[in-house]
Structure formats: C-alpha cells, structure tokens
Amino acid sequence: MELTHLDANGSAVMVDVGHKPVTRRTAVATATVLLGPAVLTLVRNGELPKGDVLTVARLAGIQAAKRTFELIPLCHPLFLSSADVRMTIDDDHHAVVITATAATVGQTGVEMEALTAASVAALTIYDMCKAADKSITITGIRLVQKTGGKSGDYHAK
C-alpha cells in the first residue's frame, strides 16, 4: 500500500491533487454521544443552562466542516457544496446519534470534512452538558459512506 502523504524521504507532504479529475464527492460520518438518562432528559427538554444543545451542536459541526483544512494539517481547503449535521435521540441507549454529510465538486474527497463535523458536533454536546455530568462518552466516530473519486464508492458494513 502506497502512503500518499509521505514523500520519497518519508516526510509528510500535502498530496498534489492537480492532476485528478473534478467529480462530485460526498461523505457521511457518524458519532454517538452517550449522555445517560438524566442528561438526555435535560437535552430533550431544553433545560441546560447553555441553551439549545442540539441546535448549537449542529451549527458547530457545519462550521467545523468548512474549516477542516485549518485543523488537519495536510487537508486541502475545499469549496463545499453542502455540509449538514443531523441529530437523532436514541432513547434506548440514552444517546444522541450525529450524522454529518459533506459534499463538493472537486479534485479531492470530503471524508475529513464529514468526520470533523461529526466530531465537533459531539464535542459541542459534551461541552454544553458537562456541568450536568462529566461521564458523558463520545464513541463510534466513523465514516459510513463516501462517493466519487478514483477509489470509488465506500459503504461501511
């Protein structure tokens, strides 16, 4: 397997994508925030002192997707066609499941943007809820789907 972010000397480099064709590329990532029953009730009822947790986390995730290149050193700055973050309350596990989607028409994929959006949304939920319970756990951050580009489509099993 060739590691594309290393040069012949083993130094980290930003991949040159100038030769790649421009195609539509999408990615979907998820993360789960395990809150526990008491905190989940506070989130659902909007009773936390910092405000509407899910709306703030959604906006933080979208903002993070747009700024991924500033956070991950070898990521390219991308013009995103769209970035979306959705939250689902999972009552059985006392959790919030985050689904982040990013899309572009360009020469490189948006997997990192989707993963960053899901991660930052999860961290925002933690930040807004930590006063109620510091044992909140963030888990399951992963790419679940990507389309476009030379490597083709990917769907997690």
Image: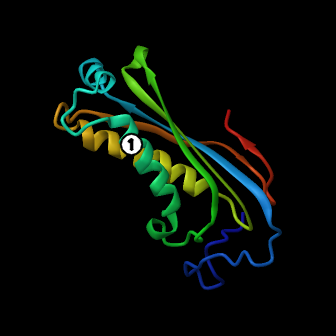
Location of residue 137 (image quadrant):
top left
Q: Is residue 131 left or right of residue 24?
A: left
Residue 35, given in percent of the width and then of the height, sits at 31, 27
Residue at the image point whose x is 28% and y is 19% from the top: 41
Check disc 1: other Cα within 10 Å, few if <14, some if 14-19, many if 20+. many
Residue at the image point whose x is 26% and y is 40% from the top: 128
Which image quadrant: the N terminus?
bottom right
| Residue nearest the viewer, comparing 95 with 79 | 79
Which image quadrant: the C terminus?
top right
Residue 151, given in percent of the width and then of the height, sits at 79, 56
According to the picture, the residue beneath numbered tag 1 turns out to be 57
Q: Is residue 28 left or right of residue 55?
A: right
Residue 51, given in percent of the width and then of the height, sits at 26, 37
Q: Is residue 149 left or right of residue 131?
A: right
Q: Is residue 86 left or right of residue 91?
A: right
Residue that protrudes farthest toward the bottom in the picture: 9
Q: Secondary structure at mark 1?
A: helix
Residue that protrudes farthest toward the top in the picture: 92
Residue 94, given in percent of the width and then of the height, sits at 36, 20
